[in-house]
Amino acid sequence: MKVYVWKHSGNSYKLRVLLALIGVEYEEVMVNFRMHEHKSADYRKINPRGQVPAIVDGEMVLWDSAACLVYIARKFGGKQWLPSAPAPMAEVMNWVSLAGNEMLYGLQYARRGLTRGICSAGTVEQMQVNGRIALDVVEARLATQDWLALGHPTIADIACFPYVETAPEGGMPLAPYPRITAWLARCKALPQWPARWQT
Ligand SMILES: N[C@@H](CCC(=O)N[C@@H](CS)C(=O)NCC(=O)O)C(=O)O
């Protein structure tokens, strides 16, 4: 299985985390953003959005981090990371969906706005409004649970982790969110949790 990533990409990091926690062997392909490889015609045959991450596993081509997490979890992870029964699966997907909405258009894009000057979804302030919605939802959830879904680590936690951790880089400090801060530490304490790529 080939996994296409970029070392500064939080969405790529989600796959790195899940693959490490499950212990899957794979081939990592670094897509060099500085060389604009992600926008090349060849790479767009894999990911038509010109983004990372992506997976090629035999005939299977996936180009969205949520789809990739689902695929890895169900193919290699047994029941733990994403159960197949309707209710627990949907509970996990609530959080994966939050990661693809308010977290992406809030936490991820506010960070990109502040660190790279790219504002593709309104002003930084508008993106921070979305980001704080996501942080408030997670903080409230963690008032009664250690993990976002099902009482144990799942792809819900992995999908949400990268851009919650970097929220301060998007102008949203985590000091007002003590439960999130404790949850980030709990995630990183899981056996085999990998560091981000060295930059
Ligand atoms: N919804 C996509 C978002 C992926 C995404 O935003 N990837 C970023 C890197 S973290 C990217 O490739 N950005 C380059 C671009 O959008 O041109 C997913 O979850 O896979």
Image: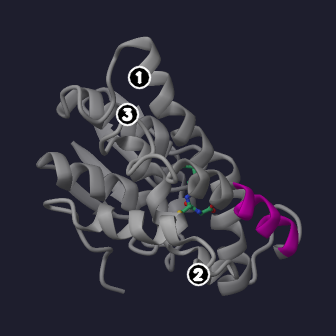
Q: Quadrant of the C terminus?
A: bottom left
Residue tagged 2: 175
Residue tagged 3: 150
Q: For the residues marked 2 and 1, what is the alpha-carbon distance in whole angstroms? A: 31 Å
Q: Is mark 3 within 8 Å of ligand 1?
A: no
- Answer left or right for 107 relative to 62: right
Local crowd at mark 1 within 10 Å, few (<14), some, or many (≥20)? few
Q: Quadrant of the N terminus?
A: top left
Q: Are marks 1 and 3 in contact (CB under 8 Å)?
A: yes
Q: Nearer the viewer, residue 131 or 140?
A: 140
Instruction: Give residue 114's mark.
Output: none
Local crowd at mark 3 within 10 Å, few (<14), some, or many (≥20)? some
| Image location of residue 121, percent across then percent down | 82, 61
Residue displayed at 72% across by 84% down: 114
Magenta span: 125-133
Q: Amino acid at mark 3?
A: Leu
- Answer left or right for 177 relative to 68: right
Mark with earlier residue (2, 3): 3
